Each structure stands twice: as structure tokens, then as C-alpha cells.
Image (tube, rainbow, N blue to C red):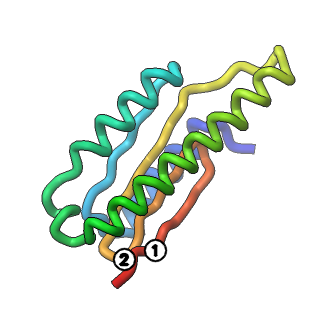
Amino acid sequence: AASLNENVQIWRIIFSIMKFPLHTFEVSSPSEKDFIRLLQKAMNRLPSVVEQEISDADRFRFRLILEDYVVGLLKDMQAIQQLSRKWTPSDYVIIVQYEKTQGTICFNGQEQVIHFQK
């Protein structure tokens, strides 16, 4: 099985080769609190090309889905940590990519694709 670091590297390669994104960003931190703060900061600093190409409604819907998705996975990770004292979380890593027709979220190896309305 590939490690989280290997999976993140694979996603970086896939995103750079297979797609022509409007914008891609990555956030990582060993601290959940810092991770959430950095993610919110990145979401608040989208370039103008994203605002021009993706409607306000789609950007808002994507952000809500992203926040719900991340919160759900963080809760799952916390539950696993409580069940297994030996388990130690690795860094929290998210790669978010905006394309004209969809947005992709890859959080600690779990992927979610959200299609935009056109």
C-alpha cells in the first residue's frame, strides 16, 4: 500500500499532467487547527480567473461541499485516533483544483469531484 506522502505525490503528477486547471492550491500541516486556518486563508484568496470563469453560486456551493467534506473526514480521523492509541495522524494534506466545469478535492488521499452548473 502506498503511503500518504506517495499518494499526494501521485495526485500532484495527475493534476499537472492530465488537467489544465484554472487554479490549484495545496495546504498541509501536522496541526488540525493550523490546517483549518490555512485552508480558510487559501479559500479566501482565489485568483480573479476563478471568479471570472466560475459563477458565484458554484463557488459558494463548492466551498460548502469542501467544508462539509473536510469536517467529516476530520471527525473520522479523530474517531480512529480515539479507538487506536497506537495510531498517530500524519500531516493533514489537501489539494484543491478548480477547472471550468468542475472542482476537485483530494484530502489525505480521498477524492471528491464537484461538477459546476453551466
Left or right: where does residue 28 sit relative to residue 41? right
Q: Which residue is mark 1?
A: 115
Which residue is depicted at the point 16% across and 63% down?
A: 49
Q: Position of residue 75 (x, y in %)?
A: 68, 35
Residue 101 image label: 2
Q: In the image, is residue 25 above or below residue 77?
A: below
Q: In the image, is residue 62 above or below residue 91?
A: below
Which residue is depicted at the point 35% across and 59% down?
A: 60
Q: Position of residue 65 (x, y in %)?
A: 50, 56
SS type, badge 2: loop
Left or right: where does residue 79 sit relative to residue 62? right
Tally of numbered discs: 2
Left or right: where does residue 22 sit relative to residue 3? left
Q: In the image, is residue 90 above or below residue 53?
A: above
Q: Nearer the viewer, residue 36 or 113?
A: 36
Q: Position of residue 25 (x, y in %)?
A: 33, 46
Instruction: Name the residue furthest top.
Output: 85
